[in-house]
Amino acid sequence: MAGEMDVQASDGVVRKPRPCPLCNQFGGHDLPFGRDGWRTVQCDGCDFVYMPEVPELEEVGTTFEWSQSYAAETKRRRKRSPLISRLDQMTRVRTRMFGRRTPMQDVRRYMQSGRILDLGCGNGSYLAGAGAGFQLYGIDISPALTRDADALFRQSGGQAICAPCVDGLKQFDEGFFDAAVLRSYLEHEPEPGPVLEALFRTLKPGGIAVIKVPNYASWNRHFTGARWCGFRFPDHVNYFTPNTLRAMAEQHGYRVMIRWRDQLPTDDNVWAVLQRP
Ligand SMILES: [Zn+2]
């Protein structure tokens, strides 16, 4: 990143410039989505949509702790337009048809036990509740949340590590994990490519990673524009479509499985199963 300088904004938050996370080039056109000076661009080279400046990681663990900004965002959205309510209704209809989807359901199509890693594990409550039969591991950048997760995961023989995910993954041996879940995590990660690369090394051959991220290609995003529920600034720094998620995962050697029901345009999320061949 020679020539690129960190910028201290008026709110005191250090904004770190970065190239396109998919093709590693600088240069994109601005999109009319953002808040408080946080920009969103679409890469001129590969069409990936991302924030070209992101908060310094140290700030993410404290100032922008995700759970806090999630609460603020929920409050902001309470006033809803009829269109958004209508789209929400479509989500509820789909949930009735297919049941509420969780990443562990996808994991259990492949295995019922083994070592499982939750990247961006938060306080660990998800795996502690849904991961029965597995040895539970997690990595998260928030010290407070990781402490809670560690206490839960140790009961299964696993542990939680407080670190940026690339650094945390380096602490595990090659082929250590049978599975990983990335639940609404990769959209937060300033370095999604290096994380997928580091995760690949720690998965066993045949091991899988289940990913859920907001779907930038969803109808809801097209219809609701800047009010789309997937936009969260500056927390969500990557905006995947099924195509760009597939492209990034294939770049790092994964076999990528995105089925038709994983990429419904009526769903605000896209799902994928990545397998280390
Ligand atoms: Zn690009």
Image (cartoon, rainbow, N blue to C red):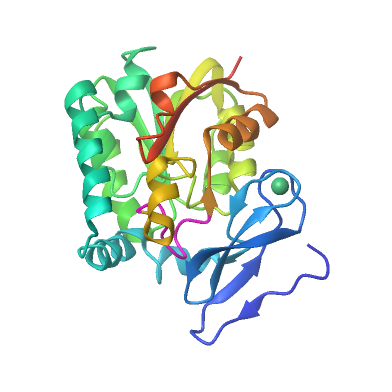
- Does residue 182 appear anywhere in the picture? no
203 or 255: which is nearer to us? 255
248 or 262: which is nearer to us? 262
- Verify whether residue 232 appears in magenta: yes
Q: Residue at x 40, y 29 (%)?
A: 264
Q: Residue at x 38, y 22 (%)?
A: 261
The image shows residue 222 at horizontal and vertical percentages of: 45, 48
Q: Residue at x 35, y 35 (%)?
A: 266
Q: Quadrant of residue 271?
A: top left
The image shows residue 218 at horizontal and vertical percentages of: 43, 40
- Does residue 69 appear anywhere in the picture? yes
The image shows residue 56 at horizontal and vertical percentages of: 56, 67
46 or 196: which is nearer to us? 46
Q: Is residue 121 left or right of residue 128?
A: right
Residue at the extreme bottom: 10
Q: Is residue 277 above or below residue 218?
A: above
Q: Is residue 269 left or right of residue 216?
A: left
112 or 33: which is nearer to us? 33
Q: Residue at x 52, y 56 (%)?
A: 237
The image shows residue 76 at horizontal and vertical percentages of: 27, 68
Query: Could you tell me which quadrant the N terminus lies in?
Result: bottom right
Q: Is most of the magenta stretch helix, strand or loop?
A: loop
Q: Could you tell me how many numbered marks the image carries?
A: 0
Magenta extent: 229-237
- Verify whether residue 53 appears in magenta: no
Query: Could you tell me which quadrant the C terminus lies in?
Result: top right
Q: Is residue 41 above or below residue 97?
A: below
